[in-house]
Amino acid sequence: MNVTAAVAIEPGQPLELRTVELAELRPDEVRVKLAATGVCHADVIARDQVYPVPLPAVLGHEGAGVVEAVGADVTHLAPGDHVVLGFDYCGRCEMCSVGKPSYCEQFGARNFGGFRLDGSSPISMEGTPITGRFFGQSSFATHANVAERLAVKVPAELPLHVLGPLGCGVMTGAGAVFNTLAPKPGSSFAVFGTGAVGFSGLLAAKVVGCTTIIAVDVVHSKLQKALQLGATHIINSSEQDPQETIREITGGKGVDYALDAVGISAVFTQMASSLTVRGHGVLVGAPTPGDDARLDLGTLLNASSPRLSLVLEGDAAPQEFIPRLIRLYQAGLFPVDELVTSYKFEDINTAISDAERGTAIKPVVTF
Ligand SMILES: [Zn+2]
Ligand SMILES: [Zn+2]
């Protein structure tokens, strides 16, 4: 069937709305009519070929919608089900078997390869198969054919445009806090970078009972928003040295936990240097390949000995984690709707540029 997609044709150029062909469903797939999709930094770096996803490409990996049709072998979903789409994984390798699918041995091929592993694609443009399997979903389109395991069933009464970002950005930030750092109640936490990932970490730190929550960014409006959503302190790192200010706030100690949601080397070094003795810091997101970070290895001897983790997709298994985030949202403890700005599908390039400039925390395109 013919569907409309926003297609990345050239690096650095706006996406173009095109009519593309969506193939027949395979037995293990479901066809989802997208209601909304978040825009995430990984879409932009794929468009710009920092990560070499084959172009032309239908990008998008925070889709949410309604199941329209199911393949013959699909058992857990039916037409009419509301779903959020997560990342792709094999479900059988060592890491998948222990509930860590973001470290699947096929993660790169399945999420950045652009095609199914047999080389086919559910999407063709002018008769030629193109990248139609970005993160297993390619959600910058009115419809997507995805493997059943990617689609997480969600309550039908909830707004799909709020739930889409749970599939990547929100899962990444919240998962890094809930699953990796697991802060003790009454502890201190700093987040570097208040985009959607950083804000999701901040909301999670509040849920688990961190009592000092420090937000670091360079955009004044985002820091003000951080104060509204639970930060106890804000640091504009274009005006203040974050490492020094964090030491002042914590009585000279440094923070117990920190999240680097920026992914550039200078920030990683600041984050690692802001931790207290045996503090735990985590780097998430999509840093540029080849970017080295400086770390004073002498911290091992001068008694701070921090723990540092590099984490993909929040150490989360989407089928288990997304429903948990939804229960927190329903209970009023995780106001992810506060992060969302909606755009029409035809304004997707504005959504992308607003995300890059920081004027929107989590742009979501609705269909
Ligand atoms: Zn696997
Ligand atoms: Zn993402």
Image (cartoon, helix red, strand yellow):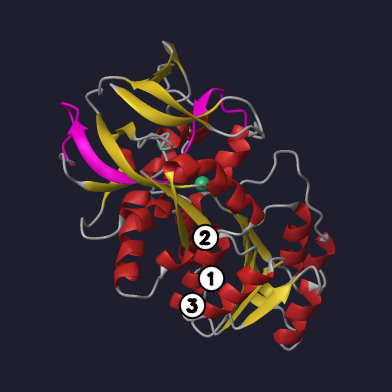
Label 2 element class: helix
Q: Give the amino acid at mark 3.
A: Lys
Mark 3 = which residue?
A: 206
Crowding at mark 1 (Cα within 10 Å: few <14, some 14-19, many 20+): many
Per the rendering, the mark at residue 202 is 1
Looking at the rendering, the stretch of residues picked out in magenta corresponds to 51-76
Residue 67 falls inside the magenta stretch = yes
User: How many marks overall?
Assistant: 3
Kindly indicate whether the residue at mark 1 contacts the one at mark 2 (C-beta within 8 angstroms).
Answer: yes
Q: Residue at x 47, y 58 (%)?
A: 341
Left/right of residue 94 with respect to residue 173 in the rendered view = left
Quadrant containing ligand 1 reads: top left
Residue 12 seen anywhere in this rendered image of the structure: yes
| Disc 3 and disc 1 in contact, CB within 8 angstroms | yes
At mark 1, the secondary structure is: helix
Give the mark, 2 or 1, whose residue is nearer the N terminus. Answer: 2
- Residue 31: horizontal and vertical position, in percent? 26, 32
Q: CA distance from mark 2 to mark 1?
A: 8 Å
- Disc number placed over residue 173 in the picture, else none: 2
